[in-house]
Image: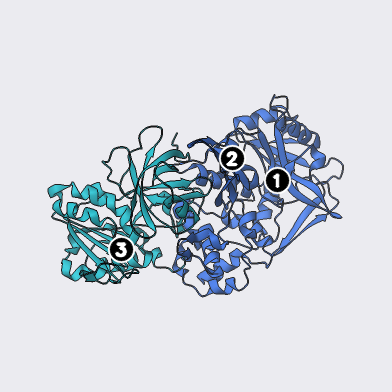
Amino acid sequence: MDQRVSFGLDGLAALIGALGDDGSEGGRRLLAPRRVPHGADIDVVWDEIDGVDSLPIGWHDETEPGRRRLVDDGTATVFGVSLATGSPKAIVHPPEAPVWTLHRTEGEVAVHLAGTDVIPTALLGVRPCEAAAIARLDTVLLGGPHPDRAYRARRDDLLVVVVECTRSTDTCFCASAGTGPAHDVDAGAAAVADLVLTEIDVGDGVEGPRFLAKATSDRGRELLVAVDHVPATGAEAHAATRAVHDAGHLQRRALPPDVAARLLGHLGDDHWQAVAERCVACANCTLVCPTCFCSDLIDTTDLAGEFAERRRTWDSCFRLDFSHMGSGPIRDGRDRRYRQWLTHKLSTWHEQFGESGCVGCGRCITWCPVGIDLTAEAAEVIS
Amino acid sequence: MNDADVPRVHRVVDRIDEGADTVTLVLEPVDGVAPAFEPAQISMLGAFGIGEAAISISSAPTDEGARAYTVRRAGPITRALTVTDIGGIITVRGPLGRPWPLEQITTRDVVVLAGGLGMAPLRSAVEVLAGTGDRFRRRVLVQGARNPDGLLYRRDHERWAEAGIETHTIVDDPAGDAADTPRWSGAVGMVTDLFDELGLDGPDTTALVCGPDPMMRATARRLVELGVEPSRIWLTLERNMQCGTGVCGHCQLGPVLVCRHGPVMSWAEIGPFHGVRGL
């Protein structure tokens, strides 16, 4: 078992340097929740970073159903924003990707699969719930008889630095989902993380934050070689454990107990219709969800009919066409589409893939334009 | 490396007209032999630049080389497939999915129940049963359709009967759509209407069922009433299948991804969900 080590902002800068350096000329692509201008304010999105200054130092996020604000708190906290606007799903399972091309010449057709060459990539600042989400995508896209080879290529070389949460927002419920705020190897994220950081505020106003780090893979250990560090003190370790524990303890939303089994007994519940009266079927929840994996396959040709291309794009079970059959869509009402989403996420995902489809990040609550809270709706359905 | 995600170029070597909007296409790979398959497995048939449709293989597993697929025109993809001429190109991925468990049947009787185009994934099973000789006490085929035109593969019935399969047909609408349809003198009604006459020995019967969802539901429930074990009532399911490899999420039916766990499922497995409207 690796012992935790400790370093300051200089160490974080050195870590960022090591993450971006894989020995090649161009280096490794390094993405993190980056601050970007957004009108007079900022937004925080997963994007390539240049250094520590790209991170939203001194900002945190405040959320509630249907609402999220980024707040400048004047602190020196580096990882104060709980969740970037989008999740790392967009990096490992992009919104759009080529699948194959077909070329027709004189009655013959040649098939070319899209290449699986990937840019070596590192992620810094993946939250424990997001690491668990990547592990669940691994199960879905790689665990079956026909693994997704493009996803395989993106995942194989991915370097992941998890940052544990020392605060929760109003919409977080990872503690009840068993995925956070601590990095828990039991959540299936063990195969995802290479290094786990915890940021603590030492409170002297001089030194700035300290980062406790623990390597969880050989590549994580190699990264720490490049960073000047000292063994974490007992006080630092205690502060980190306490902060992470409190972040979970203060969450006020939770998945109902036994929700997976109980939902299946309520497929005919009247409450699905009550949700449908508020749901606008915009699909935001499925797009921001870090585990929603459904894809559409789109075929197109050129005008001459000599070239055809297939692309994969994100799809959503809230779209009427999603369940299209020759006789029309199966889930023709919003009540049926909401039921599909919620029961898949919280219940039938277990049968399909042996775990829950929900990691408790709360993005679906935050980004729902009408503030529908799946924890409350699930509780109401099974009550 | 399993290459179920790679389309393989096939050529149409024969077309058999099966009625107004349905055609059986016989496909052969341009680069060698078609892989082995088991009855009820599907392939993703691709029309150049338009898309793919999940179609079950209808020829006998023992047929060398070419594979038969019966396609009904229902949308742009199946339309493009059905108008492909002999010599034309169709891409194929597969075979995919869980087949009928023909080798595992332990009952003395087996009954095949087809509704309309649902006969397509059952044809290859009937071909296998036609070659099983005295392994079963009774082998029964009940084929229903909306009208006489919809009774697929009637040309095979005589051969199947000679192989010892009790073959029954029934239609819902004997007049059919066309005024010149030959007069129907056979049974009228639903597949289940023939059950009394068949005298099935429920506890010693295994059933293979395919047809529209309401037909499969009604049939499975009636079979349970006759004492057939729900785990011996096998259905092949149809949902919107896009990838065929279990990763696109479209073909869910409750806990089942039809392309990954099916398309063949037992009533014991899927019954509680099959009857939920809009699931």
Q: Residues within 10 Å of mark 1 (few under 14, many from 20)?
A: many
Q: CA distance from mark 1 to mark 2?
A: 21 Å
Mark identifier at residue A192: 2
Seen at 54% across and 71% down, the residue is A272
Please state which amino acid type lies under the numbered disc 2.
Val
Quadrant of the rendering where the N terminus of chain B is positioned: top left
Q: Is residue B171 visible?
A: yes
Q: Residues within 10 Å of mark 2 (few under 14, many from 20)?
A: many
SS at circle 2? loop
The picture's colour for chain B is cyan
Position of B153 with respect to A8 (left or right) is: left
Mark identifier at residue A240: 1
N-terminal of the pair, mark 1 or mark 2, is 2
Q: Is residue A354 visible?
A: no
**Residue A375 or residue B109, whichever sits in front:** B109
Please state which amino acid type lies under the numbered disc 3.
Asp
SS at circle 3? helix
**Residue B13 or residue B253, whichever sits in front:** B13
SS at circle 1? helix
Q: Could you say where residue A342 lies in the image, as x and y percent from the top left?
A: 54, 62
- The relative height of residue B192 versus residue A117 in the rendered view (above or below) is below
Residue under label 3, please give it: B149
Colour blue maps to chain: A
Instruction: Give the mark toward the camera: 2 or 3.
Output: 3
- The relative height of residue A120 versus residue A164 in the rendered view (above or below) is above
Q: Could you say where residue A101 lies in the image, as x and y percent from the top left?
A: 56, 39
Q: Could you say where residue A91 lies in the image, as x and y percent from the top left?
A: 65, 43
Position of A158 with respect to A227 (left or right) is: left
